Amino acid sequence: MISKFPIRSHLIKRFFSTQRFPDVSWNFQVDIASPVEKAWPVLSDFGGCGKWGPPLSSTHIIGDGIDKVGCIRRSSSAGVQYDEKQLEKDQTNHVLKYAISMEPGIPFVEALVNRIQLVPDGNGKSKLNGTVTLTPKAEVSQEVLEKTKDSSIKINTMMFKSLDTFLQKQK
């Protein structure tokens, strides 16, 4: 049987597309005036970043409340609530990796993952090295990606500089 309505292959391809768009990553770095041994316990307290992160009005782990890989941190900032899932916590290498919920989220973003590592700088201080990886769910212009990158670096740098300030007040 021949359909009365011709099927336009480009429309079907667009509708049923499973095309994946390449991840985009960028790095940031923040100097921490405290040694790793002092900074890591504060940084790795996944539910406790509201104590030192000024843009956050509250943070807590939902569900059973246990800080472990797979737990969900609920944060509030400027009246917006969002969740972050802990993907990795490496106590030996001082690495924390988490995915930021995209609901309601950014329209063109499929996933946003932060990976941070605290490393000694050799002078009794440390450096926080971060990588943000964005997985787009649609084709995005270079201009939009650059603005997203710039905003992300600004937010992460501000957040982790506040960790440094918090730690200095604890001396």
Image (spheres, rainbow, N blue to C red):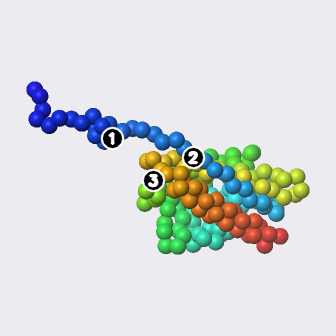
What is the distance, in whole Å, between disc 1 and disc 2 at their CAs? 23 Å
Residue 139 shows in the view: yes
Q: Residue at x 64, y 59 (%)?
A: 153
What is the distance, in whole Å, between disc 2 and disc 3 at their CAs? 13 Å
Q: Which mark is residue 117?
A: none
Q: Residue at x 59, y 62 (%)?
A: 151
The residue labelled by disc 1 is 14
Q: Give the image location of residue 52, x and y in percent.
A: 67, 68
Farthest residue to the top: give it. 1
Q: Which mark is residue 24?
A: 2
Q: Is residue 116 above or below residue 76?
A: above
Q: Give the image location of residue 159, x and y in percent.
A: 66, 65
What is the distance, in whole Å, between disc 1 and disc 3 at their CAs? 16 Å
Tell me the kind of residue under disc 2. Answer: Val
- Label pair 2/3, CB-CB below 8 angstroms: no
Task: Count neighbours of disc 3 (C-alpha within 10 A) and say few if under 14, some if 14 to 19, many if 20 or more.
Answer: some
Task: Count neighbours of disc 1 (C-alpha within 10 A) and say few if under 14, some if 14 to 19, many if 20 or more.
Answer: few
Q: Nearer the viewer, mark 1 or mark 3?
A: 1
Q: Residue at x 84, y 53 (%)?
A: 121
Q: Describe the element under mark 2 as helix, strand or loop.
A: strand
Tell me the kind of residue under disc 1. Answer: Arg
Q: Residue at x 53, y 51 (%)?
A: 142
Lower sequence index among marks 1 and 3? 1
Quarter in which the C terminus is drawn: bottom right
Quarter in which the N terminus is drawn: top left
Q: Describe the element under mark 1 as helix, strand or loop.
A: helix
